[in-house]
Image (tube, helix red, strand yellow):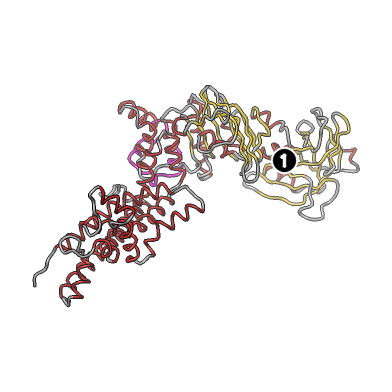
Amino acid sequence: MALEVEIERNLADFTLRVEFTATQRPVGILGASGSGKTMTLRAIAGLYTPARGRISLDGRTLFDAATGVQLPSRARRIGLLFQHYALFPHLTVEENIAFGIRKLDAGERSRRISEQIAAMRLAGLDRHYPGELSGGQQQRVALARALAPQPAALLLDEPFSALDTYLRSELERQLHETLAGYRGVTLVVSHNLEEIYRLCEELVVLDRGYVIAQGSREDIFRWPPNRQTAVVTGCKNFSRAQARDTHCVEALDWGCTLHVLREIPRALAHVAIRAHHVHVAPAREITSTQTLGQNTFPCWVAATSEAPFHVTLYLRLHAAPTGPSDYHLQVELTRERWAELQSAPLPWSAQLDPERLFSLPD
Amino acid sequence: MQLDSSPFWISLKTAFASTALVLVLGVAAASWRTGRQSRLWELFDGVLLLPLVLPPTVVGFFLLVLLGRNGPLGSLLWRIGVSLVFSWPATVIAATVVTFPLMYLTACGALDQIDQGMLEAARTLGASEWEVFARIALPLAWPGVLAGTVLSFARSLGEFGATLMLAGNIPGRTETIPVAIYFDMESGDTRQALVWASVVLAVSLAVLVALGAWTRYQRAYLVRDPARTKRGPLGA
């Protein structure tokens, strides 16, 4: 059970050069928009022809530029869930699901249709047209249609982007269940960090057509190997940096020296820390930096941005800010923590957790 | 007053035959054309659309040159014993050539409107290119194609210039209603001309009203009012 992809093609503004292998565990392809995610899925499904490279699925060659093999989409046995589902509006739910299995005999066909209708909770909707369904129902029909032919690989392109926020978590849970029961290769393309993290154990990070990181989701989120991976995985705070020794760096943009628990690589360009890994506390008496603990600095609030359940603070280290855009760090707090802090006099102290600081080579 | 009804039947026969022909040719050309983009294809379009802007007499003139006994195609046909000029098939050819652009344009428009994702979805679900066309593209383009068919039918019923040039005016064989009107007027038979003119007016109006109603029905249908889940008899 393996999908091996190694493709290359020059595009208008960058070169797509993607190489990865996916097995039984769902693989998430993460990247900013325009990084080549959808293009990669389309190439695997045979809707787009790479200039060079090879794609194979369970030992079958789907595409090989060197030998000229190029299996048409219809022979690839790949199920693709389109971003906007692409349901056939002139066919009923049942006819949509039956489209990919119309060559099976009637008995097997109706067995598979009922199986999908039950699994996707579409009972009673089989004679409806896609236009009569809600967004969530449409997504389930599209998934049922893609799964009915029992494809060797299932590719999901932004599966939740067309849905309202409140529908997402329920459908995500269902999709998680469906994927757990699916015995094939699964690829999920998304730019939503949380969704892709929950659905996929393995991640491939793309940037301008290149694979810049791949591995288990825990590793990629904990230790992004480069700056762009850190950005894509949601890291907000970066500073140019110079190494002092193996565990100490000079953070140039933040104007401080930091201890880093993990050994600093020889090539070092930036240090970074996630917004929820900076610990902010009221500091009663700050006389000098020495009186504060390790990696802890006096800080002032330059601006705040409130969300329903958390607050983002924009903090200036060492001195009072001159304006709302004069800040060093973005810090995320729960609303409760923010309520406790709010009344304390400035400056506060900000600690950059040495365990959570990462050094980036670029 | 004795009215020879043959022009009515000839017109009707010609309109049905040419519409059927133009439906197949127009949709085939349009589906072959969609998805191909280059300057050369614009020239191709230009050639196909010429009959729309040329005076029908000019179209008829070129058809006569092409299909006449000394023409490049006509001389070949003559050799196998077929002479198209001044025969009933000539009325069909003239009407087909003149109405082709209408069908081609509406079919191209209808096919271009289709979400490419649906065609791609069909391909990933194992459909061959023919199945993609027959089961997805054509049904989705059908309202537009039908509108083109109706317009072509109405236009073909009114075809005069090219028909007269290529098929002439042989009563009982090639004399269609528009041609009959012209010759009735020329011979001073205003009353008979009026009868035929009224027939054409009535048929054309009926066709346009029906087309309008159909378009409204289709639009209501595609938006799909949830209160109307049952399909109508025409909901192909």
Quick check: A56 above or below B129? above
Give the position of the C terminus of chain A as an image quadrant.
Answer: top right
Q: Examine the structure image and report whether residue A347 is included in the region drawn in magenta.
A: no
Find residue A249 and report its image quarter.
Answer: top right
* Count of all numbered marks drawn on residues in the image: 1
Which amino acid, by three-letter code, is at mark 1? Ala
Within 10 Å of disc 1 (Cα), the crowding (few <14, some 14-19, many 20+) is many
Residue segment shown in magenta: A118-140
Direction from residue B4 to residue B58 in the image, left or right: right
**Of B92 and A358, the residue lying toward us:** B92
Q: Which residue is mark 1?
A: A275
Q: Position of residue A351 (x, y in %)?
A: 80, 38
Direction from residue A98 to residue A18 in the image, left or right: right
Quick check: A147 above or below B178? above
**Of A69 and A180, the residue lying toward us:** A69
Residue B147 appearing in the image: no
Direction from residue A71 to residue B210 in the image, left or right: left
**Of B196 and B165, the residue lying toward us:** B165
Q: Position of residue B154 (x, y in %)?
A: 28, 61
Q: Position of residue B174 (x, y in %)?
A: 20, 61
